[in-house]
Amino acid sequence: MALIVQKFGGTSVGTVERIQQVAEKVKKFRENGDDIVVVVSAMSGETNRLIELAKQVSDDQPVPRELDVMISTGEQVTIALLAMALIKRGVPAVSYTGNQVRILTDNSHTKARILQIDDAKIRADLKAGRVVVVAGFQGVDEQGNITTLGRGGSDTTGVALAAALKADECQIYTDVDGVYTTDPRVVPKAQRLDKITFEEMLEMASLGSKVLQIRSVEFAGKYNVPLRVLHSFQEGPGTLITLDEEESMEQPIISGIAFNRDEAKLTIRGVPDIPGVAFKILGPISAANIEVDMIVQNVAHDNTTDFTFTVHRNDYQAAMAVLENTARELGAREVIGDTNIAKVSIVGVGMRSHAGVASRMFEALAKETINIQMISTSEIKVSVVIEEKYLELAVRALHTAFDLDAPARQAE
Amino acid sequence: MALIVQKFGGTSVGTVERIQQVAEKVKKFRENGDDIVVVVSAMSGETNRLIELAKQVSDDQPVPRELDVMISTGEQVTIALLAMALIKRGVPAVSYTGNQVRILTDNSHTKARILQIDDAKIRADLKAGRVVVVAGFQGVDEQGNITTLGRGGSDTTGVALAAALKADECQIYTDVDGVYTTDPRVVPKAQRLDKITFEEMLEMASLGSKVLQIRSVEFAGKYNVPLRVLHSFQEGPGTLITLDEEESMEQPIISGIAFNRDEAKLTIRGVPDIPGVAFKILGPISAANIEVDMIVQNVAHDNTTDFTFTVHRNDYQAAMAVLENTARELGAREVIGDTNIAKVSIVGVGMRSHAGVASRMFEALAKETINIQMISTSEIKVSVVIEEKYLELAVRALHTAFDLDAPARQAE
């Protein structure tokens, strides 16, 4: 008998019919003898509907405290509906809001962080044989104000509850059946991974694989809560995300290939190569609240240097304006920009013990005559920036080069 | 500077525009220097929408505890929207759910009763210059479960808050501009009353004038909270409901004329006139959960008696079946029923000090040759049952006979 926390997102509880399907699924787990805590989001569309209402009375700038009072009602409706659907099926159940549990957070309205969870109520209910249905995404601060955790916060609630309850597993139900080696829409031979480490998942998530929220993965890693990504309405083992790195001898070097097209590149050329020049360039960017991702500074020659970095495409215009100003101040030669870029990354803890992974990547790209514009590496990741039009080709080439392609299947 | 509790119902906050109008109104009171606590209902239609959802997952029988979790979200949305609208207008405001205030109730889900209100938070906010917006209709029990007070509960919340805060007045905003001497649709000369006593209002309400919920009037009377009924979006003094009976020398004997068409009459004839026969007849009716309103037992002759009572029309068929059974058991002669009846009542605390009010009523009806089928009296009310088709005629005749007609106005 295991204690399992199951999280169902907005799409999984988007209609009355789906809520009933979720109730059926939970009922089956109960019949297997498992103790179940369910975390649910608002029905899909509901949070946006509420935010829209709030904007209408507030000239688009709702007061955060009141916005939280309002949008937290979305999950409150879902917990009640799911508890009703369970009870109707003969499964004893009880619902709790974040305030009732109580999920204590700081007071950063609309992006609060969980500080502590009082698990006494839930343990008592589980002991009494009840399924406990908890509202995701919300909590309460020391003063009793309702808070929300920000988008994707329901995953975090699930993981935090699993940590507090020392659950055997936190299952995140989604609209995909697991984590893939890469996006199957780009590489039809992409495979579902049985297992992946927290670190790898973090890199994959931050690089644009949107299966899980980064914060919930960090949280799960920190408290070593086994996370499993599963499909809400299809059977299957999903993908397990754990600390464990070494179990399998045949672990591939690379677990997956991530990519995104959301970035833009800016270069300032002919900057005097003086100490502190990087700060002089990036300080104003950061002051403008623009996040920088990759940074490359070339070796200086003629006492000047070139400096390149990437930002989110939405920030491109703003960053360009800031940089042109900086260029004038520093007496730089010119500023150039490029939005037709894509970032491709290989991710895998296997890199730690295998040399030559980066060069194998570069070789695969060279074979396809794809030019690499920037390179950045971490312990378990190598990222390159290439021209956007080569993105799919690059991902497919790397998928094959690192032996990730699924074995050929019989014609279906 | 007064402390005023203002309650706005579902229609008054039914759209974003109306919420903004309410915010404007509250702002004006603030500018006059009053301290304001606002109680709001769910936006009109919202509670029904939520109940409909609940029924869909529960075969029409939602678990009361979970239903309360769900429908309490209706007011939670409104309090946040109104607080936002106030803050946008430069009026400091804060919203509270029933749980946050905290409005402690018993644990009778969907029809809970308020036990206690903790006014510390509200007083602190008022002192800090904030308008406090409280969710009507909801509370929390000792165990922290969310409860609701049942339909119309927002009026009760308003009155209970006014009592706890010793407010100078509890203003109930509605879609009418006050309490009238009778329904203006029936008597165009009906007049708005400046003042009415709690007792009179209770009789008017229980007799079918639906301006206020009976429970909230009882509550206001018990704690002597001055209640004022006003129109949400029109200026005017409304009607004040207080304990005060004697202030004006010119107080009319009758304050108003109430009526309803919701009842049906049942008569059992030729019942043996033995002790306990009334209980033998009404016991089974009550056991069938049918409420009886008026009761008349005729003087016995030949050792048998006739017994007549009225029930709600919806209960007529069920009551008839029970009564026919009783008639067989008691050996009564026959059972007859009539649904074409109406009840007309004159209400006024002035009756206490004026003799002959009932006979003046009977005289006015006799003049119109309206036959009286049943009579029932209380200290401040006389009710008669008449044939339904004479209802409007009777009400107009009584309105004139008791000098309630508005003075003739110039053509508008």
Image: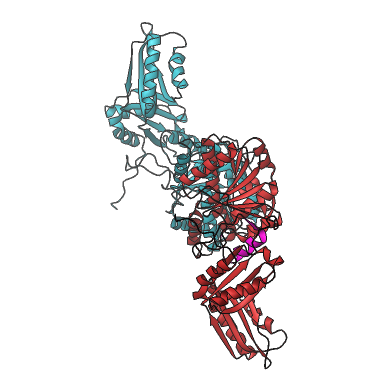
Chain colours: A red, B cyan
Question: In terms of image quadrants, where is residue A385?
Answer: bottom right
Q: Nearer the viewer, residue B113 or B348?
A: B113
Question: In terms of image quadrants, where is residue B396?
Answer: top left
As drawn, which residue projects farthest toward the left? Answer: B369
Q: Nearer the viewer, residue A181 or A383?
A: A181
Residue A14 to residue B151: above or below: below
As drawn, which residue projects farthest toward the right? Answer: A275
* Residue B286 x %, y %: 46, 21
Residue A263 to residue A194: above or below: below
Q: Is residue A198 magenta?
A: yes
Q: Quadrant of the N terminus of chain A?
A: top right
Residue B230 to residue B380: above or below: below
Q: Nearer the viewer, residue B265 or A378?
A: A378
Q: Is residue A331 magenta?
A: no
As drawn, which residue projects farthest toward the bottom? Answer: A302
Q: Tell me which residue sits at (65%, 70%) in the image.
A: A357
The answer to whether one can see residue B118 in this image is no
* Residue B312 x %, y %: 39, 28
Q: Quadrant of the C terminus of chain A?
A: bottom left
Q: Which residues are magenta?
A: A195-211
**Left or right: where A275 falls relative to B82:** right
Q: How many labels sit on residues?
A: 0
* Residue B327 x %, y %: 38, 13
**Left or right: where A264 falls relative to B326:** right
* Residue B65 x %, y %: 56, 38
**Left or right: where B181 falls relative to A206:** left
